[in-house]
Image: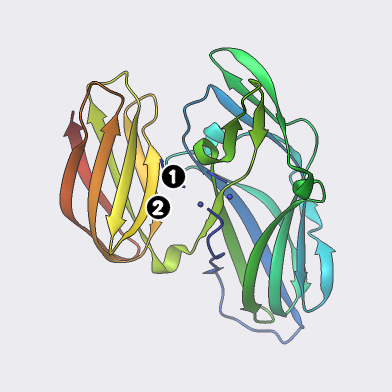
């Protein structure tokens, strides 16, 4: 499964939508959210606010689509806009996602509350360290890895330890495919030069791994035992292109 919420927190990428500068001293930021599918019925995240820390200090984005989101609604290439706003141009060092208390996970039809570590009580901090030019609109795509972000504890409770990476679409490509037979879940890993990106199949057997740097990848599909992994070698990924590996027979 592709590394929900790497939250592995990879570096935040930026999508440049407009190159027209107006010298106003502000840049416009759009924050979108997507997810890698996970082995859960639902993963509910209570999003309250998005705060940006940069040249102008800390500022909460003014237009926030607050609410409880099922992350699994935004998998395999689907995303949603969660916040927009103007920020002071210059270096942005951090994005902070502020979550409410109503986070939960549904497993086999049973709802469990998601506790959060004490370090997250003030919000989920993502390091950016990018320079925003005045008069330009950027957007950040936050890719939550739910499968990596939800930890089953020894007492049977679940804890939210978000794993997120941010995708820079203009300098990346994607790999898409599906598996047969249907009705099983499998982990899918794309590896190039020792670096791996992962996802899992959805209920229709489909998978999509986005945010891949250009290069040649080996794709490994790993179903549950007793089925054996299948590897496809030499898959070329090109910037802005979705490489389709077709149907992988397990």
Most distant residue in the front direction: 154
Q: CA distance from mark 2 to mark 1?
A: 8 Å
How many neighbours does mark 1 have within 10 angstroms: few (below 14), some (14-19), or many (20 or more)? some
Q: Quadrant of the C terminus?
A: top left
Secondary structure found at label 1: loop
Identity of the residue drawn at 58% across and 50% down: 7
Identity of the residue drawn at 53% across and 55% down: 165
Q: Which residue is mark 2?
A: 210
From the viewer's perspective, tell me whether residue 189 is left or right of residue 71.
left
Q: Is the residue under label 1 in contact with that under label 2 (CB below 8 Å)?
A: yes
Identity of the residue drawn at 42% across and 45% down: 2
Of tags 2 and 1, which is closer to the observer? Answer: 2
From the viewer's perspective, tell me whether residue 202 is left or right of residue 65.
left
x and y percent of residue 196 in the render? Answer: 35, 54
x and y percent of residue 81 in the render? Answer: 63, 49
Most distant residue in the top direction: 109
Secondary structure found at label 2: strand
Q: Quadrant of the N terminus?
A: top left
Q: Which mark is residue 77?
A: 1
x and y percent of residue 43 in the render? Answer: 60, 30
């Amino acid at each position: 499964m592709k590394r929900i919420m790497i939250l592995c927190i990879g570096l935040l990428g930026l999508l440049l939508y407009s190159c027209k500068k107006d010298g106003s001293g502000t840049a416009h930021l759009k924050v979108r959210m997507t997810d890698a599918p996970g082995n859960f019925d639902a993963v509910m995240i209570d999003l309250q606010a998005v705060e940006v820390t940069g040249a102008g200090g800390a500022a909460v984005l003014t237009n926030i689509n607050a609410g409880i989101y099922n992350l699994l609604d935004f998998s395999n290439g689907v995303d949603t806009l969660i916040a927009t706003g103007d920020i002071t141009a210059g270096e942005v060092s951090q994005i902070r996602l502020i979550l409410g208390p109503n986070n939960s996970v549904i497993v086999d039809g049973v709802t469990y509350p998601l506790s959060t570590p004490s370090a997250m009580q003030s919000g989920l901090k993502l390091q950016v360290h990018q320079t925003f030019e005045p008069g330009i609109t950027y957007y950040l795509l936050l890719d939550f890895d739910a499968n990596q972000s939800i930890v089953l504890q020894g007492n049977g409770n679940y804890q939210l330890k978000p794993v997120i990476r941010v995708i820079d679409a203009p300098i990346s490509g994607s790999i898409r495919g599906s598996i047969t037979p249907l009705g099983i879940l499998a982990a899918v890993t794309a590896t190039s030069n020792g670096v791996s990106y992962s996802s899992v199949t959805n209920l229709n057997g489909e998978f999509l791994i986005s945010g891949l740097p250009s290069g040649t990848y080996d794709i490994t599909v790993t179903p549950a035992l007793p089925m054996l992994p299948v590897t496809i070698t030499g898959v070329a990924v090109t910037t802005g292109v979705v490489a389709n590996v077709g149907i992988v027979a397990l």
